[in-house]
Image: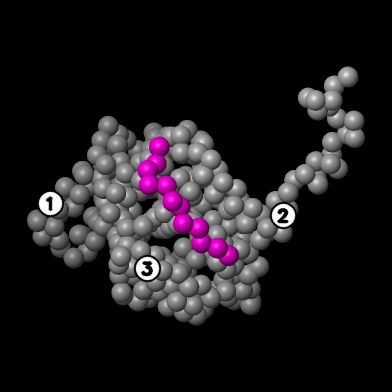
Amino acid sequence: MTNSVILQGVSKTFPGGFEALQPINLTIAQGSFTAIVGASGCGKSTLLRIIAGLETRSTGRILVDGQPVTGPGRDRTMVFQDYSLYPWLTVMENIRFCRSLAAHARDATDSEIGDATRRSVALLNLMGLARVERAYPNQLSGGMRQRVAIARALMAKPAVLLMDEPFGALDAQTREVMHDLILHVKSAERKTILFVTHDVEEAIYLADRVVVMAPHPGRIDAIEDVPFARRHRDLRLDPAFLALKRIITDRIRATAGMSADLDGMRSLTEPATSHHPGNQQ
Ligand SMILES: Nc1ncnc2c1ncn2[C@@H]1O[C@H](COP(=O)(O)OP(=O)(O)OP(=O)(O)O)[C@@H](O)[C@H]1O
């Protein structure tokens, strides 16, 4: 399998000497879905921003499709939690915004403009946005706004889609719809996806591989392969799914210094004479 993203010794120390990331080595296969989870402050967003070229790294190098990353580029686009749409533009205009700027800046040919139009219409349909093409962001639900943000990120045909807690602000039901949509997008567009989330269940449902990071300083603690061939609603209740969720959750708690075993806490908070089904008198 071809590798899409290669991180070699990528570290980050912020000005002032705060070591946010110890050297990270990670290889991500083309067309794969990698989720990054970990306790708050372990450097998930910093790592994603460095890959996007939005943050400088202190050491190491990054290759995307064999090319060194030296800054932001159209081969990597990012989707954030807060949609970041332009409120004065319609859905279609938001999707086409960067392309329109680029076309304007270098006098695009009719054929390039035609390609961009076809692409934006295809994305509008892929993301289920055709009905709201002329709506403005404030007329849309959070889920619909995030569909627009994803369509906009896909417009440039990036090799890698970077997603930082993209569904973090959505309600549980909308998140589930978005999960299936993003998996559909991944196979339709054959994208490599890197996805940061706090939600272990979301990570396992979406990803082929879950990278577990640890804090103080940020580093990779473990990498878990996700063995499920097919995603479906009941997968989240599958014993193997729940067992993997438990393994990852326990690791995150352990790296954050939280006990995975709550029994000790219960014994402190429950009254000594608490009732249990078998001992009622
Ligand atoms: N510009 C900055 N200057 C100094 N420290 C920073 C800066 N940006 C982030 N940090 C610190 O680096 C560490 C990693 O931050 P980061 O946001 O990457 O963590 P995270 O794992 O994404 O956290 P969360 O899950 O809470 O979003 C944190 O301790 C944070 O305070």
Say whether marks 2 and 3 touch (CB < 8 Å). no
32 displayed left or right of 112 = right
Nearest to the observer: residue 22 or residue 264? 264
154 displayed left or right of 140 = left
Residue type at mark 1 is Gly
Residue at mark 1: C-beta within 8 A of ligand 1? no
In the image as oriented, which residue stretches furthest toward the bottom? 59
Q: Which residue is drawn at 84% across and 41% down?
A: 267
From this viewpoint, is residue 87 visible? no
The residue under label 1 is 114
**Around disc 2, counting alpha carbons within 10 Å, would you say few (fewer than 14), some (14 to 19), or many (20 or more)?**
few
The residue under label 3 is 5
The residue under label 2 is 258
**Dividing the picture into quarters, in which one does residue 252 lie?**
bottom right
Q: Which residue is drawn at 63% across and 64% down?
A: 215
Residue 122 lies, in percent from the top left, at 21, 44
| Figure quadrant of the N terminus | bottom left
Q: Residue at x 30, y 67 (%)?
A: 2
Residue type at mark 3 is Val
* Marked residue nearer the N-terminal end (2 or 3): 3
Question: Is residue 114 part of the magenta span, yes or no?
Answer: no
Q: How far apart are marks 1 and 2 (CA)?
A: 55 Å
Residue 85 lies, in percent from the top left, at 39, 47
Magenta-tinted stretch: 221-232
Closest to the camera, between mark 1 and mark 2, is 2
Instruction: Classify mark 3: helix, strand or loop.
Output: strand
Instruction: Classify mark 1: helix, strand or loop.
Output: helix
Residue type at mark 2 is Met
* Marked residue nearer the N-terminal end (1 or 2): 1
* Marked residue nearer the N-terminal end (3 or 1): 3
| Figure quadrant of the C terminus | top right
197 displayed left or right of 153 = right
